[in-house]
Amino acid sequence: MQKIQSCCIEGLEVYPINVEVDMDTGLPMVMIVGLPNTAVKESKDRVRSALKNNGYDFPLKRITINLSPAYTRKDGTHLDLPIALGLLGASGQIPDLGGEDTLCFGELSLDGKINGVRGVLPMLLKMRELGYRRALIPAENLKEGRYVEGMEVLGFKSLKSLLGFLAKGEIPDGMTGAGKKFPDRKSSKSPVENFLDFRDLKGQEGLKRGIEIAASGAHNILFIGPPGSGKSMAAKRLPSILPPLSYQESIEVTKLYSISGKLPSEEGLITKRPFRSPHSSSTAASLSGGGLIPMPGEISLAHHGILFLDELPEFDKGALELLRQPLEDREITLSRSHRSFTYPSNFLFAAAMNPCPCGYYGDPVKSCSCSARDIQRYHHKISGPLLDRIDIIVEVPRGEYKHLNSRSPSLDSNTMAKRVLGARKIQEARYKEYAFSANGLLPDHLQNPLFALSREGEGLLARAFDQFQLTARGYHKVLKVSRSIADLEGSPDIKAPHILEALQYRQTHLLSP
């Protein structure tokens, strides 16, 4: 009997798999047991052709392939390679892999090429934690596997090159991935390099101010204004002022993109904050994630980045209601018949909408053609609980000619990014003993011991609570935004001007014509 170590992934959970191959006399047949799905059952046919086309014999015996432990479901084509090596080892055609701390996985083509698979980074990270020190993987996946420190990761393009390595111990050039380091955050010449720049947005200083506050404290933001006022343009430039991803954040994001098959092929590691902007026709399943074993949806793919929903009321109301849990819990749980899957979804939520269906309600130049009922129906597509989870609401006026034609320099992303980074450093120091690092992520019960209010500010906030008819969640949102405004100014206390500005961003009257 031959045993080969491999692993499987379900959601973000990785567990080791032993591929056991046993041969006996009798009528030639192949049985794969241990709860394999259809893709795993079809593996025997791909392996048979791959071995034959590379000059190896497929044993004509009664073959039993056990995927242990037998009580867990086995999914994916990545078990092709360990099954092939198990068959060759059990029939004595190749030497042993060399130790129980070595694992392998990969999909086989009929000609013996080893194809790339999904979920390589999370699988290698988990198996390293379990004590595995060497991995034989497809060369196509080496770009992400090379970031796993403490494990020798070897990539192979074909079954022939892998078997040559097992026989002679020679590693093909460029096929080792051990020791790759995370890119230095200080190596970039500018924090806004390769991003769209806010200098392209002429005027709209109030919009830029709201975005700067949102970025400094990781606050959710909603833009309301007529068509062509710069709402979408501003949202697309939001990544240019956010702090760079840390190593841990980069790994978390890369895991999600790896298991969903959306990992860029250049680097193998995502080092820039994601910006996801699904169309308003997107279904609830595309936002949350779907499938028998749900893959991450847009909500999770925006993890540690930005989820931007343009034309917010045009989205299906059921799809919008899906946002309520991840905006509150920073994760989303998807339940299926056999188990539940939880994916992280800690993102900055940005949205844009017109003030009415035609877009010109309240516009000083162009008159609105919508009835009061049309406007009310349009606004009611956004529920109160969802609106209550938005920290900052910015009214975006129509652009003025004098600003568009001005040759004077506009506020640029580099200047904004430096101020945001300074505020984030203050927050990191404040929350160094906690699992979060931004004001917008602060649990409500920790605000009183961590936020210092001046006497004047406390009295102002007490009066505003009744006057603005704030909910408990709305009160906490105002307090968090006030704290971010104070951090941008370097103030240790939350003062009255900070609270007054934060209250300006609770403009729920814009949605109540």
Image (cartoon, grey):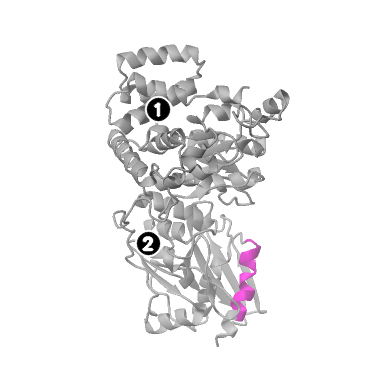
- Disc 1 secondary structure class: helix
Does 412 appear above or below 477? below
Picture residue at 61% right of the left edge, 22% below the top: 512
Q: Which mark is residue 480?
A: 1
- Disc 2 secondary structure class: loop
Q: Which mark is residue 361?
A: none
Picture residue at 50% right of the left edge, 18% below the top: 470
Quadrant of the image occupied by residue 198:
top left
Q: Name the residue under label 2.
A: 147
Q: What residue range appears in magenta?
A: 37-49
Badge 1, how many Cα within 10 Å: few under 14, some, many 20+?
Answer: many
Where is residue 330 drawn, in percent x and y?
Answer: 48, 38
Does 143 appear above or below 335? below
Where is residue 233 drawn, in percent x and y?
Answer: 51, 45
Residue 126 drawn in magenta:
no
Q: For this view, does 31 lie left or right of residue 242?
A: right
**Mark closer to the chain start, 1 or 2:** 2
Residue furthest bottom as drawn: 55
Quarter of the image where the C terminus is located: top right
Judging depth in this view, the residue of 134 and 137 nearest the camera is 137
Where is residue 405 drawn, in percent x and y?
Answer: 48, 43
